[in-house]
Image (cartoon, rainbow, N blue to C red):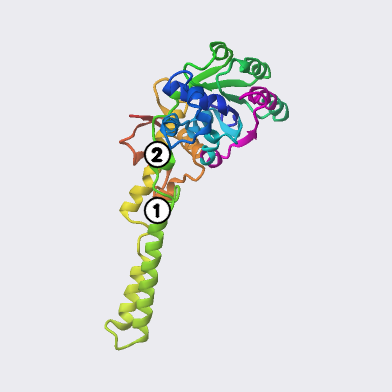
Amino acid sequence: MNETSRVAVYIDFDNVVISRYDDVHGAGHWRRDDARRHAPGDGSDGEVSQRLAEANVDLGAVIDYASSYGTVALVRAYADWSVTANAAYKHQLTDRAVDLVQLFATSGTKNGADIRLAIDAVEDLLRHSDITHVVIVGGDSDYIPLAQRCKRMGRFVAGIGVTGSTSRALVAALDAFSSYGDLPGVEDRPLTDVAAPAEDAPAAGVPATAQKKVATKKAAAKKTAAKKAADPEAPGSRAAGKKAAVAAATVPTFSSAATTRSEAPATALLRRAMQVGSGRDDGWQYSSSVKSQMQRLDSTFKEKSLGHSSFRDFIEAHTSLVDTKVLDNGQLLVRLR
């Protein structure tokens, strides 16, 4: 993959959500259950809410896969966002900075998303010549003309659809196609679930609670040192105060337990990057490409904040997850175990 590649992602959201639900629970169940009027849940609000949760669409996996083609320049999703089942994806959509296009139904449940999506895609390609790849998320055969037009305009066109609901003719019109169920990370827990809660561990940084505890210890130590320095009769007086100040200054920024917590999301990020990255046929990838992919998936990733002097040091600390080898020119190759 060329580092200058820029990707535009267009999501027919209704198509994907409905297709995923029917794929998990059986053809026609979305309409039969009237699932659009429900929100995903644990079943306490009814059986349909639990079914929606079981058929949840992981937008992160979709966008992460798109990033394997290059820098994701735009992500746009089309749906009637007033529908309860769609509105339930609010946090996923906002967390990934997805541009939302509202389309009310004009006839029954039809909202014309396919036409609007196609028009926007062609307009974007005409206005932004730097877009090199187009990813269409949806399996409707109506997208065949769009795929053909994008290819004639010199763009690489990839598609993501749900098994059993994707037109074979559309697949034939694409340069590449991936089934949603086969995307890396779909069966894994989302990175936000793997990581510790935000109040415990900020992304790619020192855990907030660890910082707070360290700050409290430093303040207490300095206060004690100052009090003893001011009272010459106090045990240890000025000497004890100096020792306390030195001890406070050398308190580690985070404990080994905190380090483990902060490494967990980085380890999950490394695995995801290796899965979606485009390597050689034998599975080996250049470490520089892996780092670039990790930063596309999470722009806050910095190996130095985890205590590693270099990315190579970070990789060598994860040999339980990846194999490594060094080429004659000194470049490091990695692959998943």
Could you tell me residue 66's position as x and y percent?
A: 53, 29
Q: Is residue 330 visible?
A: no
Is the residue 196 above or below the residue 76 in the image? Answer: below
Could you tell me residue 151's position as x and y percent?
A: 64, 17
What number is the disc on residue 200? 1
Q: Residue at x 57, y 40 (%)?
A: 97
* Lateral position of residue 129 relative to residue 249, left or right: right
Whether residue 104 is in magenta: the answer is yes
Whether residue 173 is in magenta: the answer is no
The amino acid on which the numbered mark 2 sits, given as a three-letter code, is Ser
Could you tell me residue 6's position as x and y percent?
A: 60, 30
Label 1 vs 2, first from the N-terminus: 2
Say what secondary structure mark 1 lies in: loop
* Lateral position of residue 320 relative to residue 66, left or right: left
| Residue of label 2 | 44
What number is the disc on residue 285? none
Q: Which residues fall within the magenta stretch?
A: 92-120
The amino acid on which the numbered mark 1 sits, given as a three-letter code, is Asp
**Count of labels in the image:** 2
